[in-house]
Amino acid sequence: MLSSPSRRVFLTAAVSLTITSFFASIARAEDAVSGKVTLAGWSKPISEITNLLVEPDKGFFKAQGIELVYLPGTGGGDAIRNMLSGQADVAFTDPGSFFMALDKGEKLRAIYDIYPQNVFNVVSLKSANITRPEDLKGKRIGVYSLSSGTRQNLLVMLHQAGLNESDVEIVVTGVLNFAPLLQGQVDATAATDTGLLVGRRRGLGDVNVMQVRDHINVSSDLFVVREETYQQKQALLRAFLKAYRDSAAWMIAQPEEAATLAGKRAIDGTDRDINLEVIRLRNDSAMAPAGSDGAKRALGAFDLVLLQKAADAYRHLGLIQHSIDVSSVVDTSLLPES
């Protein structure tokens, strides 16, 4: 039988262990996050966002306690509007739509750089002899929609050539639609790398392509939230970004599996070979180019210098009326650790 002092030591240790375990359980409970996040997209559920669409199969968001809901849209501006109306928590949008909303006085934060590589281009038939942005003056140019990144990035390209929107005629042609170009209804069309890929697979033929990234390699898409959401739901947003980065890393590591699942989940996923090419293009755009020191940025990290350059270009274009200090509207504290 334990002596009285030994018994006291034993009981004290047992009580201490119980208290420690109790507070550890509380800490774990506080760290755990659960809730629904509605993501307002710029597009319908297409193959290039397969990493989001496979949530029923892979459960990246469920693993972080997130119930993911995807709200389709028709452009980055549409994603912003759906978020501002309260239909969504996060917008999957382009920098131009982000800048324009900020310019109107909306209180927003960018929290993740989805595609740090620019994916936009302007495509024309060889016969049109459009090889430089300057050649677009006076031309009819198709865009996916007036609220899409195709229009925003077209305007940035025009700006680099000293042109304004009034120097061209912009025509809404719809997403992934090169028919107006082939039929002569437009002289050129603004598109994306994946759109051009699909167009070529469908018989677009030999064309001239001007890449926006050759003029300014600004990010294609960002995750943006309202300031109120940012202040009130940081734990939920942090879990959302962790889940998204896990899904993006999976698609980069497993493009073949992603291409197969796209056939099940994406509305345009009927051709597995095209799925695979689209997914590889999108994987490339998700990985930032190495910096001047050769170091690579983690998935989701921002290049504030390039983003500021883009904001300045929008100001000079007259697309926004006020200067934007991007460092004050970009937050990196919610990004998952590398």
Image: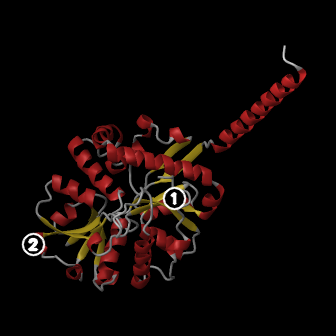
Question: Given the current orientation, which residue lies at the most extreme right position?
Answer: 4
x 36%, y 40%: residue: 265
Q: Is residue 75 above or below residue 158?
A: above
Q: Let me know if residue 91 appears in the view.
A: yes
Query: Distance from label 1 to label 2 (Cα)?
Result: 40 Å
Q: Residue 250, percent across and down?
A: 37, 43
**Mark number, residue 50:** none
Which numbered disc, 1 or 2, marks the residue that appears first in the sequence?
1
**Mark number, residue 82:** 1
Classify 10 Å Cα crowding around label 2: few (below 14), some (14-19), many (20 and above): few
x 90%, y 22%: residue: 4
Left or right side of 32 for 78? left
Is label 2 in a helix, a strand or a loop? helix
Q: Residue 78, percent across and down?
A: 45, 61
Between 79 and 232, the one lying in front of the other is 232
Q: Amino acid at mark 1?
A: Asn
Q: Which residue is mark 2?
A: 127
